[in-house]
Amino acid sequence: MSDAADFTEDSLLGGRVRLRQPREGYRVAIDPVLLAASIEAGAGDRVLDVGCGAGAAALCLAHRAAGCRVTGLDVDSAMVRLASDNIRLNRMQDRVDAVLGDLGRPPPRLAPGSFSHVMTNPPYLEAGKVTASPYAGRRRANIEGEADLAGWLKFCILMAKAGGSVTVIHRADRLDGLIAAMQGQLGEIVVFPLWPKADSASARRVIVRGRKDIRTPTRLAAGLVLHDAADDFTPKADAILRDGKSLII
């Protein structure tokens, strides 16, 4: 790893999870915390975090659902090493691990159809349509690479077992692509908007979850309001982000 001065040590869930992350480049926001809170993992469940980065979502889920086993997958070797450092920092080596691999060439240990839940916070931006960040880590986290959104979700669906869930957090303006990639493969799809404020005309983020080989119709949930009029987190959002409560979608 690089010199310690290149990293900061921060905390999630009100200090319950410690996270080392690069001082420059991609920095964890609330999206992976909300994603992890939405996963209904139980004892003995295997969960795959596709594009795990420094391990924020995996660690938050492992803290809340102590009986599950979480594997993080990332194409960036430096981030896999950092995620492994964070796993040790939180003393979760017995329940969380991070492995190196890309979606086109996943490691053999990740067998298709073997995960009860697959969660992902994929790159939000389409390649060639935005100005790329000078930081390589931020570019990889924010801009699609070889795998576009459809390819990313195809891999997630492949890794889920029959009846298992695939959950993604993404920009609301890419909802059409999310639904299109899930249709015919996932059912019981739930679209859960994340509203900036109660009076917001539109959501900026959505959490979308479906179940493999299930044919129940799609539904739109009421969603979660993140901020009050004073720009503080609402009580419900605060309970999830600081206290580690579940997000029921």
Image (cartoon, rainbow, N blue to C red):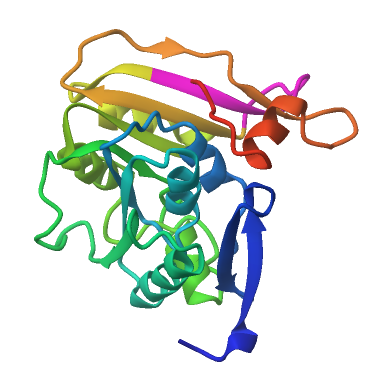
Q: How many marks?
A: 0
The answer to whether residue 172 is above or below residue 183 is below
Q: Position of residue 45 (x, y in %)?
A: 27, 37
Residue sitting at x 50%, y 48%: 60
Rendered image quadrant of residue 144: bottom left
Give the camera-side residue of 110 and 217: 110
The answer to whether residue 247 is above or below residue 157 is above
Rendered image quadrant of residue 203: top right
Q: Which residues are magenta?
A: 190-203
131 to the left or right of 11? left
Q: Position of residue 161 (x, y in %)?
A: 15, 33
Q: Residue furthest right?
A: 230
Q: Is residue 136 magenta?
A: no
18 to the left or right of 122? right
4 to the left or right of 2? right
Quarter of the image where the N terminus is located: bottom left
Visible residue check, residue 105: yes
Q: Position of residue 232 (x, y in %)?
A: 83, 37
Residue sitting at x 21%, y 56%: 103
Visible residue check, residue 124: no
Rendered image quadrant of residue 191: top left
Q: Is residue 195 magenta?
A: yes
The answer to whether residue 96 is above or below residue 121 is below
Residue sitting at x 69%, y 49%: 14
Q: Position of residue 137 (x, y in %)?
A: 48, 71
233 to the left or right of 49? right
Give the camera-side residue of 104 and 164: 164
